[in-house]
Image: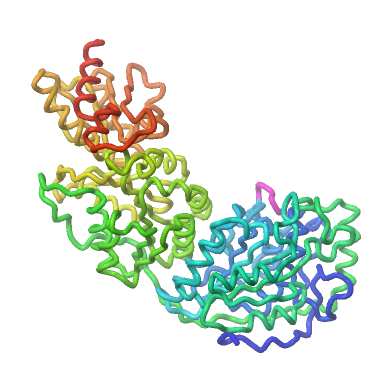
């Protein structure tokens, strides 16, 4: 038995509205709202029908929560990974008393929060779902947080569809849950046989699903997903490993002429059919008595993740050299000393991203996610829910590209998580293009809720880590492999959307904007040009998104309208395009760009910077050309 739960005896209440004839006489626990208009307009009604008994058992027998306080930290968690079945999620929360039943009639309307797929503007939704295969990873993050950080009794339930089991990210999550013995995690596999356009690969071969789950280290139970009694018994089993309940179900269960039939995925019922189904549902309801939900055990600790500040200023001295990737690891470990809810995740690159420094100092708050970046992002999203932790994920910047959908969904989930992408650009040298992050700025800039930091020395890196911990939304910190000189004093103030003028004079002729390695190349170019009596103004943007438009514009006007951007990134989506977009329409401003223009190759860092025209010599020549044009 799960601790604190009642024995799974047959409840003396109602039949599920979606139970077909011939089901057990007490085959459901709750009469979900059965308004004709709701059934007519509901998207994905067949996917909801296959899960009706599962949802009834979960919400009105198994789960412990406060119905009027869905985000209470003590509550059990639920993730609807098959997010297209959103109407049944909304229906259970209406039955539980949180949603007014009439609000269900506003499903998918622009005036309602009941979107077509679950989103966190709904108080009962922790993570957005609908891009299939991601719910279990987020549930893993919630379960890990509950077991290892909160050390609380709440449990995490995740319902998946069988179609999404073709996603590799599901099996990354399955492996993660087994490795970390997440015995507070229960996955329910709704095996209803039918996908969107075709039957699923295994259809109803539940024994094969069982073998796969068991091979990944899960306790696995096969049940009739339309049998309330079997579901109650399955949820009542406690094991020292994660549990997978494989529920054999039928898509469209209880809808005459549609049950287990193809070509009905995502289609609302025609009005005449909806009328008939409502009558059938009403005829099966045996009782309208409300079932009281079991409240949770209140043992989750109070957590405060606001106003997290470094315990002391940076300790670097101007002129010292350090790679920003190492400065990131040192800064994260330092920040971890002031708040025990700072956590770090890595994908087996901790000795390159230097998150290993955090692990050595705070081993209980480091999560090794191994080479599974998609799942690492989903786990971080789960860890961050209900403001339980402040996650920092690190990997080679290039490898976050494979997790772009998870990052995109994290933004839709209104998640507050931080990423550090190391090994950016051709400046990493001999490892070659597969390891070089050259698209990462474009990717993170495209995320609506993202703040993109690009620190250029150890001081600014430490400030970026502190700011990221206190910034809502997605934060990305881009770090470099080469060691570069400290250029800022330890008392330098850094803010989001606040660029720095690193070098200036009264007769500057061109504004040069660089970041990371190219900022240092720009400073070196300034020394070369000074010998020719050409002065340049050098700007460090610090954040690429949002960009300090005002400072860039005033600098450009002070340098005859000439701007040169230089970046260790492809032309598309990087600093040059960010600056150009910010200044579009401004009269008298010309933006010239230097960036990596083709797929690079292996070589020494200096050789590659020169080959792709982003080193000091290329910058100096580009400035000469701009001055000569005048």
Q: Main secondary structure of the magenta part?
A: loop
**Where in the figure is residue 347, as x and y percent of width and height?**
39, 58
- Coloring basis for residues: rainbow
Q: Is residue 370 visible?
A: yes
**Where in the figure is residue 567, as x and y percent of width and height?**
30, 33
Tell whether 237 sits left or right of 481.
right
**Where in the figure is residue 587, as x and y percent of width and height?**
36, 17
Residues 586 and 520: in front is 520
Tell whether 297 sits left or right of 416.
right
What's the magenta region?
Answer: 106-111
Residues 359 and 171: in front is 171
**Where in the figure is residue 590, as x and y percent of width and height?**
33, 19
Tell me, yes or no, whether the highlighted magenta stretch contains residue 548. Answer: no
Q: Is residue 466 visible?
A: no
Q: Quadrant of residue 98?
A: bottom right
**Against 42, is 92 above or below?**
below
Q: Quadrant of residue 353?
A: bottom left
The quadrant of the image that shows the N terminus is bottom right
**Going 26% across and 68% down the picture, which residue do you hit?**
360
């Amino acid at each position: 038995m799960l601790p604190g739960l009642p024995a799974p005896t047959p409840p003396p209440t109602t039949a599920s509205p979606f139970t077909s004839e011939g089901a057990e006489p007490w085959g459901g626990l709750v009469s979900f709202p059965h308004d004709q208009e709701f059934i007519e307009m509901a998207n994905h009604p067949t996917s909801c029908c296959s899960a009706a008994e599962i949802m009834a058992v979960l919400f009105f027998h198994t789960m412990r929560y406060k119905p009027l306080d869905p985000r209470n930290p003590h509550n059990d968690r639920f993730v609807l990974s098959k997010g297209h079945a959103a109407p049944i999620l909304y229906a259970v929360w209406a039955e539980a008393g949180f949603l007014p039943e009439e609000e269900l009639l506003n499903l998918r309307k622009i005036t309602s929060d009941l979107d077509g797929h679950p989103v966190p503007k709904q108080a009962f939704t922790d993570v957005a779902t609908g891009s299939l295969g991601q719910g279990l990873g987020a549930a893993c993050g919630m379960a890990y947080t509950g077991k290892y950080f909160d050390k609380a009794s709440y449990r995490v339930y995740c319902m998946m569809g069988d179609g999404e089991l073709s996603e590799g990210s599901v099996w990354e999550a399955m492996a993660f849950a087994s490795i970390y013995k997440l015995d507070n995690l229960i996955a329910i596999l709704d095996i209803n046989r039918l996908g969107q356009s075709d039957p699923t690969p295994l259809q109803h071969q539940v024994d094969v699903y069982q073998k796969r789950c068991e091979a990944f280290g899960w306790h696995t139970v096969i049940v009739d997903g339309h049998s309330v009694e079997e579901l109650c018994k399955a949820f009542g089993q406690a094991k020292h490993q994660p549990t997978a309940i494989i529920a054999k179900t039928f898509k469209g269960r209880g809808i005459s002429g549609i049950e287990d039939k193809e070509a009905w995925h995502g289609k609302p019922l025609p009005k005449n059919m909806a009328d008939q189904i409502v009558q059938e549902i009403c005829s099966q309801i045996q009782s309208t008595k409300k079932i009281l939900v079991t409240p949770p055990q209140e043992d989750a600790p109070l957590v405060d993740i606001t106003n997290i500040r470094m315990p002391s200023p940076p300790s670097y001295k101007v002129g010292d050299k350090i790679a920003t990737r190492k400065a990131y690891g040192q800064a994260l470990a330092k920040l971890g000393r002031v708040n025990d809810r700072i956590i770090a995740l890595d994908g087996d690159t901790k000795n390159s991203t230097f998150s290993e420094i955090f692990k050595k100092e705070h081993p209980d708050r480091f999560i090794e996610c191994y080479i599974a970046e998609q799942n690492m992002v989903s786990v971080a999203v789960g860890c961050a829910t209900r403001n339980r932790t402040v996650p920092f994920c690190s990997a080679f910047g290039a490898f976050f590209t494979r997790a772009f959908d998870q990052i995109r969904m994290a933004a839709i989930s209104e998640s507050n998580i931080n990423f550090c992408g190391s090994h950016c650009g051709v400046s990493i040298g001999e490892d070659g293009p597969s390891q070089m992050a050259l698209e990462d700025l474009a990717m993170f800039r495209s995320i609506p809720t993202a703040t993109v930091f690009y620190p250029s020395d150890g001081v600014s890196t430490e400030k970026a880590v502190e700011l990221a911990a206190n910034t809502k939304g997605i934060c990305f910190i881009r770090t470099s492999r080469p060691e570069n000189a400290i250029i800022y004093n330890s008392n330098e103030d850094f803010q989001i959307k606040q660029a720095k003028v690193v070098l200036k004079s009264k007769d500057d002729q061109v504004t040069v904007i660089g970041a990371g390695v190219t900022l240092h190349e720009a400073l070196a170019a300034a020394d070369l040009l000074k010998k020719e009596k050409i002065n340049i103004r050098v700007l460090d943007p610090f954040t690429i998104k949002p960009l300090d438009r005002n400072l860039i514009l005033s600098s450009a006007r002070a340098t005859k309208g000439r701007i040169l951007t230089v970046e260790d990134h492809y032309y598309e989506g990087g600093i040059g395009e960010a600056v150009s977009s910010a200044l579009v329409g401004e009269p008298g401003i010309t933006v010239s760009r230097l960036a990596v223009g083709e797929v690079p190759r292996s070589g020494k860092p200096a050789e590659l910077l020169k080959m792709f025209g982003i080193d000091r010599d290329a910058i100096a020549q580009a400035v000469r050309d701009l001055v000569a044009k005048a």
